[in-house]
């Protein structure tokens, strides 16, 4: 019995403060995939590969691992400030995040 | 008017992780891995392509497209177009033969939309992969995944597509085959061809320069596109949209993403173009149908997810 419960993946509570929404993210899934699996809609879904920036968030609290993200969307400074791409962030516990940080840059801002 | 540009010859795509990218372009899409150079770039091609390679993957911090190259008829054409590109006002750079292994001298130039392009006349010709030059069989037996037959075109987003379309039509001799215009008559999208295909390259107006929407690979049949959809599910690959049909070009298509977020298309069929054809026009108010003929509705992702 106990070995079975051990195998059930853990769920983490993800609070998306700007949207006043939350969802449960399965251990081992990215924040974005976890949200999609729950049919929650609180982070924009784009490429799911760390390239397009549509899922850009700011992490307010919580531990996580991450995969390489496009520097075009997350500069080193932004990384230090807690910005990240939700499709590349794998929570290790409950998290608090802010979504909707994607913006299209025009030529002048580049 | 034709000026000696033959076809899209290569595209260099930036990826965040080379091994993951090969899982996509080689194992899922079914391109043939032909070479790895001293910089670690990996060269691939569709099995029907006669030149040595058409897709080059480069590992980098920022996914997207480095450049697209077009093959021209010969060195005289190359020299002539080189001159005309300078006259047009492009920033032009000559890349020596061998900078890409197996490729001759390239003329690289920038464009009003912020994309880098090149033309070249020579590339090592290794022939179609897996079939003999004489009495070729229908296809090689050991193709993988979607069995993509060739790199076909790409779609690029940037500001001032009028300028880049001017460059492609008036300097490089492409024709405008299809377009989207708004109520004021402003062109929001242009599909350009150097051949009989409905497009060899396409542009969509967008504020940020130099953006990459997708690279596209041609399959033979609608059945193949449906099988590609199955493979996308089997491999749990990030799907964008499809299988569906475009209004523009009428191609039957599916869009999905590589593991670094670059969009890929596989498609079959579509319109043809002769030099005396008027451009096919779609109205911006019907953009949903122009892009996704069945849904008749655009999704935000198609417009905003770019690398
Ligand atoms: S969805 Fe494109 S970067 Fe996350
Ligand atoms: Fe396309």
Image: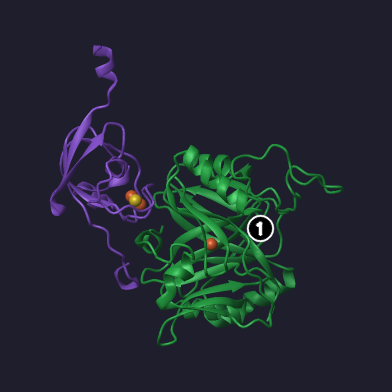
Chain colours: A purple, B green
Viewed as shown, does residue A19 lie left or right of B117?
A: left
Q: Residue at x 25, y 47 (%)?
A: A40
Quadrant of the frame with the N terminus of chain B: bottom right
Q: Taking B204 as reference, is B33 above or below it?
A: above
Q: Quadrant of residue B184?
A: bottom left
Identify the residue at image location x=82%, y=45%. B132
Q: Which residue is mark 1?
A: B97
Residue drawn 45% across and 56% down? B64
Q: In which quarter of the view is residue A37 placed? A: top left
- Residue B46 in sight here: yes
> Where's the C terminus of chain B, which quadrant?
bottom left
What is the x, y in percent for residue B237?
45, 43
Relative horizontal placement of residue B86, taking residue B204 as reference (left or right) = right
Up-down: is A61 above or below B207? above
The subunit carrying tag 1 is B
Q: Is residue A100 above or below residue B87?
A: above
Given residues A6 and B85, the one toward you in this image is A6
Return the x and y of residue B8 as percentages of the image width and height.
63, 63
State whether residue B109 appears in this view. Answer: no
Foreground pick, B295 / B251: B295
Give the image quarter of residue A8: top left
């Amino acid at each position: 019995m106990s070995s079975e419960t051990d195998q059930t993946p853990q769920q983490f509570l993800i609070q998306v403060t700007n949207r006043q929404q939350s969802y449960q993210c399965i251990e081992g899934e990215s924040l974005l995939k976890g949200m999609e699996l729950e049919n929650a809609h609180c982070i924009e879904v784009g490429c799911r590969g760390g390239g397009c920036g549509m899922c850009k968030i700011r992490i307010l609290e919580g531990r996580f691992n991450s995969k390489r993200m496009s520097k075009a969307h997350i500069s080193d400074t932004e990384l230090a400030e807690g910005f990240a791409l939700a499709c590349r962030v794998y929570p290790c516990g409950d998290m608090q995040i802010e979504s909707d940080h994607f913006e299209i840059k025009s030529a002048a801002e580049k | 008017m034709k000026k000696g540009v033959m076809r899209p010859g290569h595209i260099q795509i930036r990826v965040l992780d080379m091994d993951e990218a090969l899982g996509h372009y080689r194992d899922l899409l079914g391109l043939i891995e032909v070479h790895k150079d001293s910089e670690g770039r990996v060269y691939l091609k569709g099995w029907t392509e006669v030149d040595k390679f058409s897709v080059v993957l480069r590992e980098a911090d920022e996914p997207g497209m480095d450049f697209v190259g077009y093959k021209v008829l010969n060195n005289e054409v190359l020299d002539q177009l080189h001159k005309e590109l300078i006259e047009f006002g492009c920033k032009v750079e000559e890349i020596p033969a061998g900078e890409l292994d197996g490729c001759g001298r390239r003329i690289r130039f920038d464009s009003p939309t912020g994309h880098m392009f090149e033309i070249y006349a020579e590339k090592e010709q290794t022939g179609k992969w897996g079939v003999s030059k004489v009495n070729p069989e229908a296809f090689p037996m050991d193709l993988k995944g979607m069995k993509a037959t060739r790199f076909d075109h790409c779609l690029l987003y940037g500001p001032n597509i009028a300028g880049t379309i001017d460059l492609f039509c008036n300097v490089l001799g492409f024709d405008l085959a299809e377009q989207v215009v708004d109520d004021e008559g402003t062109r929001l999208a242009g599909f350009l061809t150097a051949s009989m295909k409905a497009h060899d390259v396409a542009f969509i107006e967008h504020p940020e320069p130099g953006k990459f929407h997708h690279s596209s690979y041609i399959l033979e049949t609608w059945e193949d596109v449906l099988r590609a959809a199955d493979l996308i599910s089997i491999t749990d690959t990030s799907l964008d949209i499809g299988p569906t049909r475009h209004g523009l070009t009428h191609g039957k298509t599916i869009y999905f993403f590589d593991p670094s977020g670059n969009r890929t298309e596989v498609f079959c069929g579509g319109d043809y173009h002769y030099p005396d054809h008027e451009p096919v026009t779609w109205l911006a108010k019907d953009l949903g149908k122009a892009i996704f003929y069945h849904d008749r509705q655009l999704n935000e992702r198609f417009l905003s997810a770019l690398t």
